[in-house]
Image: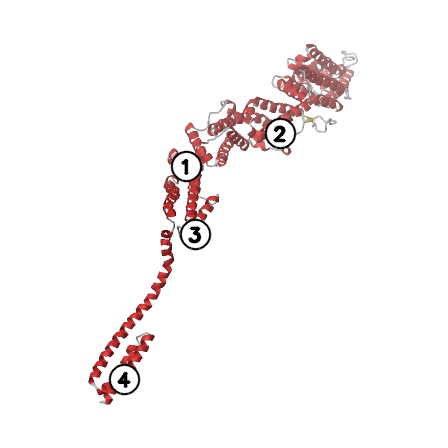
Amino acid sequence: MYPRATGDIDCEKFKLDRDIGFGVGSVRFQAYELWILGLGFWEMAVVSDSMIEKLASARRSLKSSLEKSRVLGLALEKSGPRLEEINQRLPSLEAAVRPIRAQKEALVAVGGHINRAVSPAAAVLNVFDAVHGLEKSLLSDPRNDLPGYLSVLKRLEEALKFLGDNCGLAIQWLEDIVEYLEDNLVADERYLSNLKKSLKNLRELQNDEERVCLDGGLLEAALDKLECEFRLLLTENSVPLPMSSPSSLGEQPCIAPSPLPVMVIQKLQAIIGRLTANKRLEKCISIYVEVRSSNVRASLQALDLDYLEISISEFNDVQSIEGYIAQWGKHLEFAVKHLFEAEYKLCNDVFERIGLDVWMGCFAKIAAQAGILAFLQFGKTVTESKKDPIKLLKLLDIFASLNKLRLDFNRLFGGGACIEIQNLTRDLIKSVIEGASEIFWELLFQVELQRQTAPPSDGSVPRLVSFLTDYCNRLLGDNYKPILTQVLVIHRNWKHEKFQERLLVDAILNIIKAIEKNLETWSKGYEDATLANLFLMNNHWHLHKHLKGTKLGDLLGDSWLKEHDQSKDYYAAIFLKDSWGKLPSLLSREGLMLFSGGRATARDLVKKRLKSFNEAFDDMYKKQSNWVVSERDLRDKTCQLIVQAVVPVYRSYMQNYGPLVEQDPSASKYAKYTVQTLENMLASLFQPKPAKYVSFKGRQPSGKFSNGFT
């Protein structure tokens, strides 16, 4: 029995160890104590079975206690994290119940403070919601409904103004309530710290103008769309002024109608109003100037204005661009009266609500960019060219064009915004007046300088004489005299000198007198007196013919004209007498009386006299073939007189004595010319040669006068 009992005890011991192994440290210790105690009881059980029953009961009780200990240990392990969570939640719970510990007065007042702070913030948030509600409309195309678009845009502006005015106020209210909560210990410190941080960020955003964007960029996007619509309206309705041809310039109406429909102008005005309200007026003006100036340039392109870019180095004198100067006046008048006049009116119509300075400044930019400065600069280039008499006429043409447009210039370009145009115009007029006056008063001196030059080798009318007779007549004509008088009056006023109209007349009469002295001096320069007589005949007739019935001729008087006519006849008679009038005497009939000396003697005399005639004729014809009678009527009359003086005598001589030499083997040597040939040769004398350029060269009075007369 003992061994079995011992084995059972061992078994029970192992079971007990296994059960005890599931307990915690303190339970394990108690279990071992109980086990030792159980051994004692077991020893006693050997003696008594009743003790065994008790021991089994104790074992079961111990086993139950061990199970409970194990469950309790597991529960303790799970309760650790829960306790940590409770520990973390305690501060917030403490903060939640803190107001209960605050003073009663603070708790009662805090509600009103919070309501007053939250109300402005709530209003701001409501407006924010309204702003976002406008987004769809403002991101659509304004063209679909421009009035509606502008209305929505105005609502956005009002909303943004409200936000701008009230965001700061709402933040201030919230800051005040946070300060109140903090002072009265009504809220948790960490909660208040987070509120302060958020409010600080809002305040920084409000103060930073570059970063603040209350509408998320919606206003800027809407304004960009308006600018695009503004440009599109202008571009679609800006059409270059149609012209069938440059010759139709004078047929255009004096003032062009408004180039844009009224409805378009009204739309432009509405857009300008909104853009101006949002500080985009300058961009609006920039777009307007760009489109309209481009349209004016397109209208001017049909006129072929490339000549406006010509520089002084590209032409020798004014005559080479004389045609351009004539076009310049017409083109300038067209540009001012039709194009710039229309732009002036349109600027007023479109920008009148903004103010005078704005639309005048806008027009000034259009005029400058469209080409008015190029017109004025071309005139300035002409004034800087070489001085010559033709230039005087061209300067007077320029002055006449500017004077004709004076009222238009003063009205269109008289504002402060057009100061550049005014200065350039003023400089141009000053240069024109000074240049024209200087050339005019130096004309007499230049004519006197030509007295030192040689006369024409062909005895013709010098280019100086023919040019100045026509030139002075033009200066006294209805086209130039009023302009020249006005120019001289202005110039003398600048010098604080009085001007009398007689000064102009006397200056021109002195030029004619100087020409007469030149003719007298030049005639003495010929070695051949016959050529000198031809020269004087030519020039006296030229003065008489070209001045009779003219303004200048009337000033000179009938007696002066008659004197030159008589002088022409006088020198013509001397010329004929001293040249061709000597030929008939060479065909003398002396010694040729029939049978006076025999036929052979008569033949020899005829041969001798024909030979002398032929030699004299050939020599005179050869020499005078290079001479010129400029005026056709005088040339025909002179040739007729020569024919009348020579041909009848030659015809009679050949009829009577020609047969004496016709049978001679050398007859052609003596009967060299037929009557018809001789007449044709004489009738073809004094033909003019192609005109050559003649310049007045002499001492330069100012070092600047080119003296070119062509």
Q: Please tell me the numbered disc located at residue 380.
A: 2
- Of the pair 393 and 108, the residue shown nearer to us: 108
Q: Rate crowding at label 2 as few (under 14), some (14 to 19) or many (20 or more) other CA atoms within 10 Å.
A: many
Q: Amino acid at mark 1?
A: Glu
Question: In this image, 21 relative to 351: left or right?
Answer: left
Q: Measured from the top left, where is residue 463 in percent x and y?
A: 68, 22
The residue pinned by badge 4 equals 40
Q: Amino acid at mark 4?
A: Gly
Taking the spot 32% from the left edge, 68% from the top edge, the residue there is 76
Q: Find residue 213 and report its image quarter.
A: top left
Label 4, secondary structure: give it: helix
Q: Are marks 2 and 1 in contact (CB under 8 Å)?
A: no
Amino acid type at image mark 3? Ser
| Marks 2 and 4, the one that precedes in the sequence | 4
Residue placed under numbered mark 3 in the picture: 193
- The kind of secondary structure element at disc 1 is helix
Where is residue 326 shown, x and y percent of the image? 58, 25
Comparing labels 3 and 1, the label whose residue is closer to the camera: 3
Q: Nearer the N terminus, badge 2 or badge 1?
A: 1
Distance, label 2 to label 4, CA atoms, is 142 Å
Q: Which label belongs to residue 158?
A: 1
Nearest-to-viewer mark from 3 and 4: 4
Q: Nearer the viewer, residue 463 or 381?
A: 381
Question: Disc 1 to disc 4, how far (Cα)?
Answer: 101 Å
Left or right of 47, for residue 302: right
Label 2 element class: helix
